[in-house]
Image (cartoon, rainbow, N blue to C red):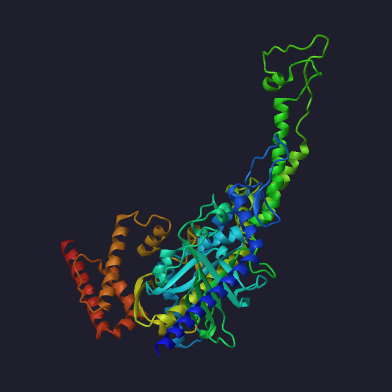
Amino acid sequence: MEEQGVKKIDAEAENARHIAAEVRRDYEERREKRRATEAQWTLNSCFVAGRQFAEITPVLGVEDTLPDSIWEERQVFNHIAPILETRLAKLAGVRPVMSVRPASGSDEDLKTADASTKILSAVTARLQTDNVISRATMWSELTGTAFYKVFWDKSAGDVAIVAVPPYEVYPDNLCAETMDDVRSLIHARALPVREVLDMYGVLPEAEDVEFALPERASAAVLSDMRRLRPEGYAVLIERYERPCGDKPDGELTIVCGDKLLYRGPLPYMNGTDGVRAIPFVKQDALPAAGMFFGPSMVERAIPLQRAYNAVKNRKHELINRLCGGVIAVEDGAVDTDELEAEGLRPGSVIVYRQGAQPPRMIEQGGVPSALSAEESRLEEEFNIITGVSDIMRSSAVPAQAGSGTAIQLLIEQDDSRLAITSDLIRAAVRDVSRMVLRLYKQFASEERLTRCVGEDGRVELLRWKGSDIGECDVVCDTVAETALSRSGRQSRLLELLSLGLLGDEDGKLSSATRHKLLDAFGYGSWETAEELRSLHEQRADGENLRAASGAEIEAEDTDDHDVHIRSHIRWLLGSECEKAEKRVAGLREKMRAHVRSHREMKALSEKAEAGNA
């Protein structure tokens, strides 16, 4: 029996090594198929970093070309880097606000959708998804494609979202256009062997890693990252396979070196209707037909950048000839070595052979106007190809735009040129949000307490768990996204103010409304009275939260009773009070008594002031 147990263990170990070797071969094959695409990404990185005399060689390596002659000008006039920075700055304003649409019009579905929206908003703020989106957008603009990995972090007991560069992703089909068309996907990244040991309890052997982690490389070394060979690293390979006939739950295989770390079904039910799916979302810079990895603006601008560098360098060569001059000398008339070294400097004495012609400067003419015309044409073509106009790059308004309406139309036209890329970002963030809610529904079995913002802008506490999240559809709230812009918010407030929609029935602004307007324009604490009102509002909101937790609250003489009464009544009429009443018996009656105490203290204060008068 003992011998049979040893044989069984040996057979299992041999099977594990066989599986690890098969996954490793699959990874190497996919890597070889993608080598041409990766060479283009490296060339893009070279041009952004200023290494613009590089070419893709027949062996699919990126190498610098040699000058045709020793006098050839090879300066770089980098337009691609500022264009990339301008696009990133413009796309930084695309931060979609996601909301959850209820499955039906029933009260239960409406409440579920409202809770899911608040959960999604709180998670977005806690995970700092704006930074993740910025990082993914940087990679998609540079290479054409970036990825989001949405997974459950067991150590933190929460959802995690990371931006993954395309260098780490290997699909089974390079002609698949979307993630739904991919049947299998490999995520391979270099990690320190000690980190692999902490994650899986297995210490793999360090291997010769040919590439550094792209997310840890600076822009200056991106073009050389295939030459970096860090020590103590190994490639961790995760292969995800979609559910199929013989694998109804899909399969995840994790390999490092020759060791099999994990093999089992896909861990996350993050697809539609609870189906297990690959936990990656793809974000393209531009759409592409029949291609998994999309193109980037950098790739399109490379031929223009080469032509622009050539024109500028030829122009400088002509200027150098005009300034330095070209000397004609009769054979044997002078010492040409000395003349070549010294030139015809002012005050120099030239000794030439008797009877010979003295050295003279050859007339060069001027710089051809065709070069300047070609330079201007190429600069305009940069704007056409990349979708970045002079307004975006220089932040200057043309002199022809004399009215505010004309300026606004120009700005809207600039935004429209990035509309396709903006829509692709929104679509990717929407898919990420869906995966986040589905992971919470699967793993958040215990009740959680989340601080979120209610409809009236007040901070409230939401108690929830995974079962509270229904099968709701996540949509992009474009109105809320526009409102996130400070200038957009201020302009809309001015429009509402001019229409008289912010005043009361008498057309006057209340003190609270005036305070909010000042706060929107950056003058929230301009008046001491309004700053004090803000403190009273915060105190009243804190009393609402303490009452919801069952604590006793009392009115004080120093309270602004009008502010407290308005805050307490608003909370009593809201849904949060209804939820809290299920946990705290007699909550509504206690709050009504508290409001009455504020009114009584206010009446006493007014009576005392009237008596003093």
Q: Position of residue 438 (x, y in %)?
A: 47, 80
Q: Residue 151, relative to residue 106: is it above or below?
A: above
Q: Where is residue 236 in the image (x, y as percent from the top left)?
A: 50, 68
For the image shown, how many numbered marks are present on the structure?
A: 0
- Residue 417 is left or right of residue 235, and the answer is right
- Residue 398 is left or right of residue 373, and the answer is left
In the rendered view of the protein, which quadrant contains the C terminus?
Answer: bottom left
Could one spot residue 476 in this view of the protein?
A: no
Could one spot residue 245 in this view of the protein?
A: yes
Q: Along the line of sight, which residue is nearer the eye, 328 or 18? A: 18
Find the residue positioned furthest to the top.
Answer: 354
The residue depicted at 82 percent of the width and 13 percent of the height is 356
Residue 525 lies in what quarter of the image?
bottom left
Q: Where is residue 448 in the image (x, y as percent from the top left)?
A: 34, 78
Find the residue positioned furthest to the right.
Answer: 355
Q: Along the line of sight, which residue is nearer the eye, 304 or 124? A: 304
The residue depicted at 37 percent of the width and 60 percent of the height is 515
In the rendered view of the protein, which quadrant contains the N terminus?
Answer: bottom left
The residue depicted at 41 percent of the width and 85 percent of the height is 467
- Residue 8 is left or right of residue 553, and the answer is right
- Residue 178 is left or right of residue 437, and the answer is right
Find the residue positioned furthest to the front.
Answer: 3
Residue 201 lies in what quarter of the image?
bottom left
Q: Where is residue 189 in the image (x, y as percent from the top left)?
A: 51, 65
Q: Along the line of sight, which residue is nearer the eye, 115 or 86? A: 86
